[in-house]
Amino acid sequence: MSSRRRQNVTVKTDIIKAADFIRNSKHTTVFTGAGISVESGIPPFRGENGLWNRYDSSCVELGYFRQRPDEAWKIIKEIFYDFFGKAKPNAAHIAVARLEAMGLVKGVVTQNIDNLHQEAGSKTVYEFHGTAQTLSCTRCGLNIPASKKIVDHIPPRCTKCSGVLKPDFTFFGEGIPEPARTLSFREADLADVFLVIGTTGQVMPACHIPHVAKNNFCKIIEVNLEPSSYTTMITDIFLQGKATEIMNQLMEELT
């Protein structure tokens, strides 16, 4: 048997095993990172082709934002609204939503702020790092949707008090929002299967969530292009490949 054929057989066997884990699970949680959105046209922030190699990451540092909101918002608008705003859910997002609709997934913990899980149809989504879909006033706290009309004004201003508006995602130097933090770690306590998709486990404290799940005797299924910090430490089944391709194969076994 050729090495390629042997590899294909191994992948197929692991897909079947992963599908059995999910099918027999009482509580499967999906945990996603930037890798699931790459095929929607959103590059990761870190790494060789990461956004922080092209843009100054200080735009999302809390201190810098407060001191220079005009300069910070120019970059924020370009990345998170002009660029991210064009992205659409891909087959992996859709597969996750279908698994939830089938009752095979109880919830999604995501590190992403792109809203693609919700657009794909997922109902129970815990946004660990917040969202770019709403803005809050840094002066009076008013919370409003991030409409094009609002973000086209640099910097966006509160309609109530004229204070500077800030996106509701977590900046460097800012804590993880509640109740997303508590609910995300609760999933690690409740789940007996964790389906980890497109995250290498480098961002703290989000990277701890699968480890907490593993400590609670949870089975870990990992979907990534390359081995991650999870692969040899906590992963039970490593499915190597594009998120869309692997999730489509899983769906074939589960439907």
Image (cartoon, rainbow, N blue to C red):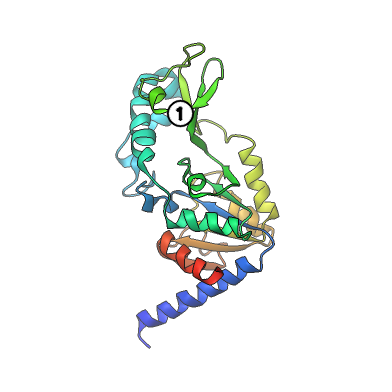
Quick check: 44 left or right of 190?
A: left
Give the image location of residue 3, x and y in percent: 36, 82
For the C terminus, which image quadrant? Answer: bottom right
User: Label 1 neighbourhood size at 10 Å, few (<14), some (14-19), many (20+)?
Assistant: many
Q: Quadrant of residue 227?
A: bottom left
Type of amino acid under label 1? Ala
Q: What residue do we see at 38% from left, 88% from top?
A: 1
Q: Nearer the viewer, residue 71 or 115?
A: 115
Please state the total of marks drawn on the protein image.
Answer: 1
Above or below: residue 186 compared with residue 234: above
Give the image location of residue 222, x and y in percent: 51, 62
Q: Quadrant of residue 16?
A: bottom right
Above or below: residue 246 compared with residue 152: below
Q: Nearer the viewer, residue 205 or 30?
A: 30
Above or below: residue 10 compared with residue 173: below
Give the image location of residue 244, x and y in percent: 42, 60
Q: What residue do we see at 33% from left, 26% from top?
A: 74
Give the image location of residue 104, x and y in percent: 62, 61
Farthest-out residue, top: 161
Please name the residue that numbered disc 1 is placed on: 146
Q: Can residue 229 be seen at all in this image of the molecule?
A: no
Quick check: 165 left or right of 27?
A: left
Q: What residue do we see at 31% from left, 48% from top?
A: 49
Q: Quadrant of residue 98?
A: bottom right
Q: Can residue 157 be seen at all in this image of the molecule?
A: yes
Farthest-out residue, bottom: 1
Farthest-out residue, left: 54
